[in-house]
Structures are given as structure tokens and as C-alpha cells.
Image (cartoon, rainbow, N blue to C red):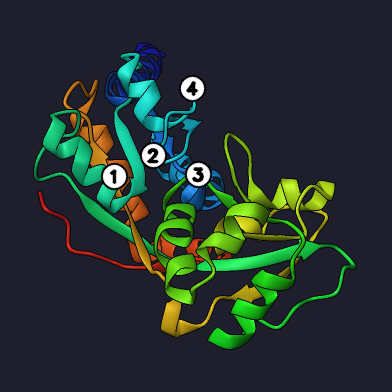
Amino acid sequence: MKTFIWIKQCILITIIGVLGVTSAFAADIQVITSGAFAEALKALVPEYEKQSPNKVIISYGSSMGSAPDSIPSRLARDEKFDVLILASPSLDNFIKSGAVQPGTRVDLVASVIGAAVKAGAPKPDISTVPALKQALLNAKSVAYSASASGTYLSTELFPKLGIAEQMSKTAKKIYSERVGTVVARGDAELGFQQVSELIPIPGIDFIGEIPPEVQQTVLFSAGITTNVSNLSASRDLIAFLASPKAAPTIQKAGLKPVLPALPW
């Protein structure tokens, strides 16, 4: 009987020890992501948390711009995050400014620009450069995002197509909400944004990607901040997001996995 009691006590001590170790190594990881990777991240976090004791807390903001909820604005207010996920050029700027640790950038996905109309509306042809130009000129109103894709459209694509002056009258930059939401509401006839940001929006019809000749492929990357709370946990999350395990979910979200080698 004494032996049985002793065994039970040993088992109990072992269980408590294991739980204590698990708890000791568990961490809350504060992540902020721009819109292009948002849907993929929301789907991937439950998968990650099944295999890890860590918990991921997600915040959202655009890669650039001065909107109050943009990533630059939130970092300027000294909001604390462990991991940033955003367009690579913007992440590189944060590395240069000292907000993100050098040597922690990991390219996660490649993202391209697409277009959408309100559900049930006629779908213009955008499959060739001339067709895209005509669709832009024909649209009574055009919406584009305040982040990387919108900056490319307004500063490079419209001038390249020779329609910058015309678009200045019909196109508008959208802050703090998805372009698809604006299109679904009927506030814009034609909307452009990263494909992964358009696909999940109800009330719109996705037309397709813009032609390859004028397409902009943007890498979205993760980096670890200089004031990270738990470096090991942050690396572990990024390693999962960059792994083949995450690839199917990323592809479903309209993105192309990069599957990089990790820098650590």
C-alpha cells in the first residue's frame, strides 16, 4: 500500500513539474501585420498554437502612411510589439531606424495586385495592359489602398499608362479599411488591392490579377523588434510561418509562400 501511495505521489510530482515547465516556457507573442498577410495569419495562428504553448496576439495596420492605426503611427506612439509582418521595403525602413533587429528579416510570401467590383456588377476586362487602361478610364470611381499596392498604382502605374491626370479626378486612396469594403458598399465602381486583401471581403466579385507586364510583386516579411519580450518565442513563430506546414494555408489566402532559409 505504501508503495502504491509513493508511486501516485511521484506521478503527481512529475505532472506538476511538466505543467510548470510548460508554463515557464509559454509566452504571449504580440504581432502586428499589414492587411496582405492578415487573413493568412488569422488562419495560421490556431495551427501554430496547437503545436506550441505560446499564445499569439494579433494587431493590424497598414505598412505605411500616417493613419492613426498604421504600423508607423503605432510604433511612433511606442506601442509594443514582438514581431512585425509587412511589406519588405517598409520593414527595411524599420531596420534602418532601429525599431527592428538587423538579421531578423524573414521573407514569408509574395503578393500581387488584383481588382474587384461590387457583387453582380459587370466585370471589366483587365487581362491586358490596353484593357486595364480602358477599364480604369471607363470607371466612374476607383479605389486603391493607402499601403504598398496603392502607392505603386498612384505613383508608377497611372503615370506609366499615361492616365495620371484623369485618375486624379476619379481615383481615391482608402485609409483604415479594406478597398473591397468600399467597393461592396458601392462607394467605388472598381477597386485595387493585394489579392489576399480582396478575396475574403463579402459583397464583391474578384476580377483577377492585373497583367504581368505592369504587375508589382511585393514580398511581405517578418522581423523581430528591438524591444521584443521573448526572442525565442518570436523566432519560433516566424519559423512556423516560413515553414512548409504553413504553405497550404498561405496559398488559400491568395499568397505565394517563399519558404526561405532562416537567418538564425
- Between disc 3 and disc 4, whose residue precedes? 4
Q: Say few, some or many: other residues with alpha carbon within 10 Å of mark 4 (under 14 / 14 to 19 / 20 or more).
A: some
- Between disc 2 and disc 3, whose residue precedes? 2
Up/down of 231 relative to 41, above or below: above
Q: Amino acid at mark 3?
A: Ala
Q: Which secondary structure lies at badge 1?
A: helix
| Quadrant assignment for the N terminus | top left
Label pair 2/3, CB-CB below 8 angstroms:
yes
Q: Going 51% across and 46% down the picture, which residue do you hit?
A: 35
- Quadrant in the rendering for residue 258: bottom left
Q: Amino acid at mark 1?
A: Ser
248 displayed left or right of 232: right
Q: Residue under circle 2?
A: 64
Q: Which secondary structure lies at badge 2?
A: loop
Q: How far apart are the two marked residues, 1 and 2, measured between alpha carbons? A: 7 Å
Q: Amino acid at mark 4?
A: Pro
